[in-house]
Structures are given as C-alpha cells and as structure tokens.
Amino acid sequence: MTTNLDALLAALYVFIDDHVAPTAPRRRIGRPPKLSDAELLCLAVAQALLGFPSTRHWLRFAHARLRHLFRYLPQQSGYTKRLNTAGPLISQVIEALARTVPTWEDNLRLIDSTPLPCAASRETVRRSQLAGWAGYGYCRSHSRYFWGLRLYLVTTAEGMPVTWCLATPGIGEREVMTALLERDHHLVRAGQVILADKGFAGREFEAFLTDRLGIHLVRPDRKDEPARHGRLARSRQWIEAVFDTLKGQLSLEQHGGRTPQGVFARTAQRLLALAAAIWHNWNTNAPVKRSLIAYDH
C-alpha cells in the first residue's frame, strides 16, 4: 500500500463500505443520496487532513482538485447537513478502525481532557445555540479562561482514539471520565493500565476503576501523598502529543460548530482523521504511527 492521501481515502472507503456501512441504519424515505455515507466520511477526513476549517473554502478546493476521487461533490448546505447528522456513524467507524490495530490488544490506555473553545466574545456567547451545554472553564496549561466544552479522550499508546465524549467544563474530570468508562465499559477490559494526570486523583475514581472494571490507575504522585509512581513526565507527554496533533495539524479548536450536533460531528471528524491516519500507517508499516505528514498535501 502507498502512503499518500489518495491511497488512504481509497482504503478508508473500502473499509467503511465493507465493515461499517452494511450495519448502519438505512434510509427508507426519498431518493438515495448521490454521495454515499462512505464517500461523505472520506471527504470529511480529507478536509481535516488538508487543513480546511472553513467548509466554503474546502468545497471550493475539492471541486477544483479532488474530482478524480469523488463522483459527486455536494454544495455547502448539503455537505453541512449531512456532516452534522453523521456523528454517530463517525463514532462507529472510529471504534471499528481502533479494533483492527495491534495496540488494541495492549494493556495500556491513556486518558485526559482538553478545552474545546466554542466562542471568543461575550456577544457570541449570549446568542449561541450552545448555551446551556457549553460553559466557562479554566485551562491550567495556558492559564486562561475559555467558553466552550471539554473533550475527554481515551486512546491507545500511539494515540488511536478508543472512546471519547464532550462535557460542560463545570463538571469534574473524574465524574465525566467515570460516566464515559461506565457507558463504554466494553471498550476496556480487566487487567489494563490507565495512565492519567494528577487531575484524576481521587479515592472514589480509583476505586471505581479497580473494583468495577478491574483496571489499574497510574498517575503522577501528588505532593501530599506517599510516593508511588513518580512524576511520569515523559509518559504523560504521549497524550499531550495526541492533543497537540488534534489542535495543531487537525485544527480542532477551529471546528466551526455552532450547534451541539455540529460541534459533536466536527470533533468526531478530527478524531476520525487521526484514527484513519494511524490505521493506514499500521497497514503500510510506517515508522511513526501518528504521523500525518504524508497526508497533508
């Protein structure tokens, strides 16, 4: 297999069409769409990998440069509507891709959360359709406040997304991660090790992982507790690097979502692009599994 964008999109289309599309709910009313679900997701992945946060600019580029890959390209309104409703399907494809990589069987999982800003002005916050779901939070890494959501992510060691969710910043990290792992308990198994940061320190959360799921929590030691695991600074950089890829190369913070459905779908779009690149890098024996360099041009 060749490591370039065309090869990735072709392989991803075949994978979705063979493994996911047959199990997806079928439309019963109206004419079938000119752009299939597999083609829609490939188009969305290409948008994220090529770095086009603006849908208008992306479709203009696609109509000019990607006609050889897609038999039909929608207009902006049609593409936006289809993408906004594709969130559950994208999550299904991400899980299917994750199950095929060798690290799915590994005993190590990474967990963390990161801010997902959704507005930058008071006027936008006041009239946003995200009011009631998004809220104000504090980003410790950048020492600043933001208005939006937090992305909670569980990945394999190289960054393949396993499960994820979005939550209001006002809810505690441990509470959200507990709910996420309880909902998707079938994606983790007893005996695994979860690597987290100090924000997940807490007896109740650790007891939940140990007693309910049979998982061992490893995190940096706090100053007010006995030494157990040390600082783990080097290992903690793995999940930080995943977030850096999502925000830097995949423009996560420029998602452009204006509704809960839109924010969910556009976050899923970036995670799918990351998952597809890692999956394809495994299939082509690329030396760095999370590298997107071969697909960003």
Image (cartoon, rainbow, N blue to C red):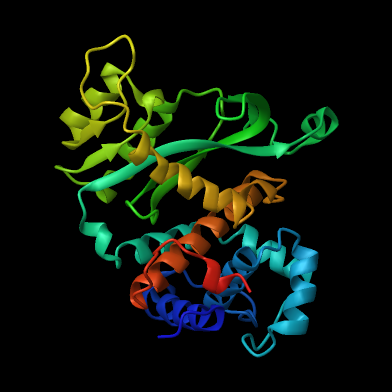
Residue closest to the far right: 123
Count of number-bearing discs: 0
Residue visible at 71% across and 63% down in the picture:
52
Q: Position of residue 27 (x, y in %)?
A: 54, 72
Q: Nearer the viewer, residue 45 or 281?
A: 281
From the viewer's perspective, is 288 left or right of 30?
left
Between 228 and 216, the one lying in front of the other is 228
183 displayed left or right of 41:
left
Expressed as whole percent of the image width and height from the top left, the position of residue 67 reads 69, 87
At x 16%, y 36%, the residue is 214
Residue 217 is situated, as x and y percent measured from the top left of the image, at 24, 32
Residue drawn at 57 percent across, 68 percent down: 45
User: Image height check: is 34 above or below 24?
Assistant: below
Q: Residue at x 30, y 68 (%)?
A: 100
Q: Residue 62 is drawn in which quadrant? A: bottom right
- Res 28 visible: no
